[in-house]
Each structure stands twice: as structure tokens, then as C-alpha cells.
Image (cartoon, helix red, strand yellow):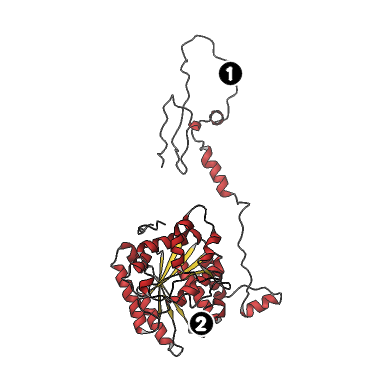
Amino acid sequence: MDAAAPIDAAPSGAPNGTAPHDALPAADHPVMRDVRDDGASHDRTSSDAGRHSAPPPTAVPPEPAGVADWVRGEQAVGVPEAEPVARTRREGRASFLTQVSVEEPAEHGFRGWLTRLGLPVGPSEAERAERADERDVSQHWPGPRTISIVNGKGGAGKTPSSVLLSAVFAQFGGAGVVAWDNNQTRGTLGWRTEKGPHDATLLDLLPRADHLLGPSAQAADLARYVHHQTRDRYDVLRSKPMAMANEQRIGQADVDAIHAVLSKYYRLIIIDSGNDESDPMWQRMIDHTDQLVIATTTRDDHAEAGALLLEGLAERDGRSAYLAQQAVAVVSQADQKAPAEEVRKVAAGYETIAREVVTVPFDPGMVDGHLRYGALRPATRRAWLAAGAAVARGL
């Protein structure tokens, strides 16, 4: 991915003829797959017939029809070509390499209990769906992918979404995931995650970008600037929330440099964005994005801000419009007392403007302090796995 410029949206043979009499035999010419010449024939005559008065040679028993032509590599009348015959035989034979996928027995619930007793039974539909989501988030794509978490309102759930999606992709898909706090105004991603053995932020990484992009740099060099999450197995590139915005102003060229470094060392970059959609830092983030995630709670102002953001992106340019159309909405129940009808109402509203919508139930483990996937309730973990799978299907 070219970090210096916006990324644009992406997504024979002739039939056989009749050979002249002086051409090479048919076997010396390539045959295009699935092209047949059923009417071709070649009558052989002697150009010397009648020129000499020598007696005819001793008669020999005639060969069966078509044998001489097969020997000479030519096609006889009524004899099929060798290549289609071989292909037919190959297609009709069962491959010795064919393997039947065997479904693993159930692991959860009553069915899992039976399996542990030595009576293996198949998984339930719910367990099958969970396994399918795990497969989706476990994929490795060719080249790095960038996921941006956005909403124009603070407190809409962008940081929890960034943290927990990073954890899901790292735990099920393996290493190579980084969460990046792309925020001019006191981003809190560093406050909600573990701190490494240093205080480095993206401001410390920027002066070393050229070295980290050079041939002598090693992956371990990046440990000086990112904070590894020991339980959830992803890294965090912090901003510096203790500094004023004017002390850590990040421009578009800086976003390009950071993204280039992270693209070299990670397969997935998950960006926790700020609230100012007009900021050049925010705008440039969109140019590098492969999948957009709208984070919102059930509050009306959060939901409305996310919808307005998608409408604004639809008018920005063609690529941004595509990102908005393919966005995934994550609706979190931030208020424990919020009725289920509110969650369904917000989700239904986003179903008309987003590719997929996932709802996340209230969980006290998401309210304050460090966020860890393993500290959440089972239903909440399952919801974040579903959110990760929805995101993965767009990469």
C-alpha cells in the first residue's frame, strides 16, 4: 500500500482450423482446452502415384481403422482427439488426495459434556456458528490491512472497540496486530491498555521512521516504541494524552510515515481515531483504511453522529463512499439499564446504511480500567468475536 498517496478502489486462444496439406501433423500443434474439432479429417494420398510404372508393392493386411493415424499423431475420421479422452478419464477418476472434512465433536454445553464422557456428538448450530466466526478472524490476508474505528462523538465506544477487536484478531489469528491511537486531543488508548517497560509514544517513533523502514532495521527494534499486551498478544502505539494538542500536532505526512512503518511490521493495523473529522490527521487515516467500523452506544447523539459521519464520507470521494457503504456498525449497550428495545432500534437503523451490524451487551469489564478480552463475560466475548468476524469478511 502506497503510504504517500490515497489508495484508489480496486476490485485466449483461437478455435482449431483446417490445416493445409503441407502443415505439420495435428499432434505438433497445441490444442486449446475445451475446444474440439469434430469435423476435421485428413486423407493421405501419395504425390508420386502414377508417375512410375513399377509394380505395386506386395499387399499387406490393412490396419484397423485409425491405427495408422494414431501412430503418426494425426486425427482420423471418427476417432476422438487424445487430449479430450485423457481429460475425460482424469475427470472421471476419484483423486487419491481427496479428503473428507470431519467435523470435530462438540465442546460446549450438554453436547460437550457428552463428548468428555466419551460419547462424542456433533456441535449445536450455535457452536458451529462460533467456529465459523473463529475461522473468519483467523485468516491471514496477503499484505497488511487497516481497520479504522470512527465516530464524531466522544464516549461512543471507539477505544473499547479498538482494544477488543485487536484482542480478537490477535488471539484467534496469531501475532502481527497493532492498535494505533491516531488522536490529536488526548487519546486514551494508552490508559485502557498495558504499559510496556518504557514511556514511548508515536512522537518517539516518528524521528526513527526512516531507520525502521530501512534494510538494517529488525522487527525487535519496534519494541522500543510500542507497548505489548501480554495477555491479549497485540501491540499498542500510544499517543501522548498528557501533552496539549499543539505540542503533538500530527500532519498528513506524519500519518503516512507511521502507517508505512506499521505496515512493514504488522499484518493488521487497527486505528482508534479522534473526534475531529476535519483534522488532516483524521482525513489521511481514511485514505489508508481498508475497513471502516462505526462504534456507537445506544445513546441517540452517538448513533446520530455515526450516521452523519457515514453520510459525509459518501460525499467525500468514490473510495470513501465505498468504505461507508461497506462499514460495520458495533452497537454497545453502555448503560446497564438501557432496555433491549433501544439496542434493537439503533441496530435496525444502521442495518439500512451499513454492511453488517453487531450488538454488544453491557459488561462491567468494559466500563473502567484496562480492557482485556478474557475478563469479559462469555456473552460479551461472543459478541466481540462476531464483530471481528463481520470486520474480517470485509478485508
State the residue in front, 33 or 145: 145
Q: Which residue is mark 1?
A: 59
- Name the outermost residue toward the top: 53
Query: Which residue is drawn at the image coordinates 33% and 80% (left, top)?
Result: 304
Q: Badge 1: few (under 14), some or many (20 or more) residues near its Cα, within 10 Å? A: few
Residue 11 horizontal/vertical position (percent): 39, 57
Quarter of the image with the N terminus is: bottom left
124 to the left or right of 120 = left
- Name the outermost residue toward the bottom: 337
Q: Which residue is mark 2?
A: 369
Residue 100 horizontal/vertical position (percent): 61, 60
State the residue in front, 357 or 291: 291
Mark yes or no: residue 278 visible.
Answer: yes
State the residue in front, 242 or 193: 242
* Identity, as a three-letter code, of the amino acid under mark 2: Gly
**What numbered label is drawn on residue 110?**
none
CA–CA distance in space, label 1 to label 2? 102 Å
Query: Which residue is drawn at the image coordinates 39% and 63% (left, top)?
Result: 254
Q: Secondary structure at mark 2?
A: loop
Comparing labels 1 and 2, the label whose residue is closer to the camera = 2
Depicted 307 relative to depicted 283: above or below: below
Mark yes or no: residue 132 visible.
Answer: no
Residue 90 horizontal/vertical position (percent): 57, 46
